[in-house]
Image: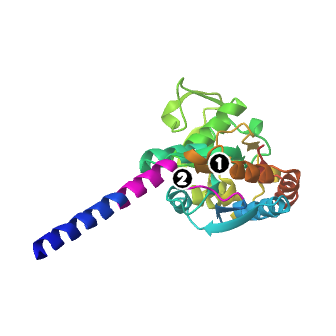
Amino acid sequence: MKNKFLLGLASLTLAAALAGCGSKEESKEQGKAIDENKIVVGVTSGPHEQIAEVAAKVAKENGLEVELKSFSDYVLPNTALAEGDLDANSYQHEPFLDTFNKDHDTDLVPVGKTILNPMGVYSEKYQSFDEIPDGATFGLPNDPTNGARALFVLQEAGYIKLKDGADLTASIRDVEENTKNLKFIELEAAQIPKQLSEVDVAAINTNFALEAGINPKEDSILLESTDSPYVNYIVVRAENENDPTIKKFVEAYQSDEVRAFIEEEFQGSVIPSW
């Protein structure tokens, strides 16, 4: 009798475990449903958080509560989204998202454009790029993403041409034409503002420029256009791409109120991209 009881108990335990696995698998397939009255959005501190706060006020006026969670790095907001702790996030451009999905086997998708933090080209010696002499030194970030970004800014302005097929990981080895025979010097992105006086011209990321008191709109001699692939997006899990609550938040973000705030607060150093 005892053995029969233990066997029955083991069977029940196994059945419960299998049922638990099944419900987890089913939950994973169906995705996490989004509350139609509330959404949890991850942002990084700084401009993304400031702008999302205004978007949250607009959303609240339209009956949607937005809870913001701020992060200090670029990985956790995507990890939290993939695991269901967030309903959306707002802080990244598509090249970064593509790399994250590939490296982490996730399926996160962009659903609405937000802002562009335009990369600028600066010089302490010249007032325009046309003034720069043949053979001038050009400082650019030494990491693949930002180095390629600087090269595309130059190509868009017509000063270099990259090889056919050069993608968002292009490097100085992909430069096929160089009208000013620029001498490229790869530098740590965060240090370029401090080293600007040591080169003739340099490409600087907006966040590092702002930290150094450099205004992209006023001080740059070349500035990335709004057609840049580095425009930032609101991002969600693939199964929520067409969720009505997500669409409501995107509409709130892409409102006239948010655009006016960005233009007044950042004076061209951050650009609305919708």
- Relative to 139, residue 10 above or below: below
Residue at image mark 1: 202
The colour scheme of the drawn protein is rainbow
Spot occupied by residue 181 in the image (x, y as percentages of width and height): 60, 32
Who is closer to the viewer here, 197 or 158? 158
Q: Position of residue 145 (x, y in %)?
A: 54, 45
- The residue sitting at 76% across, 44% down in the picture is 273
Is mark 2 in CB contact (under 8 Å) with mark 1?
A: yes
* Residue closest to the eye, 190 or 251: 251
Above-or-below relation of 13 to 182: below
Q: Is residue 62 left or right of residue 203?
A: right
SS of the residue at dot 2?
strand
Q: Could you say which disc has been placed on residue 179 in the image?
A: none
Q: Earlier in the sequence, mark 2 or mark 1?
A: 2
Does any portion of residue 63 appear in the rendered image?
yes
Q: Between residue 18 and residue 273, name the one nearer to us.
A: 18
Which residue does the numbered mark 2 point to in the structure image? 187
Give the farthest residue toward the bottom.
2
Highlighted magenta segment, given as a residue range: 20-36
* Quarter of the figure that contains the C terminus: top right
How far apart marks 2 and 1 lie (CA) works out to 10 Å
Image coordinates for residue 82, horizontal then vertical, percent: 51, 55
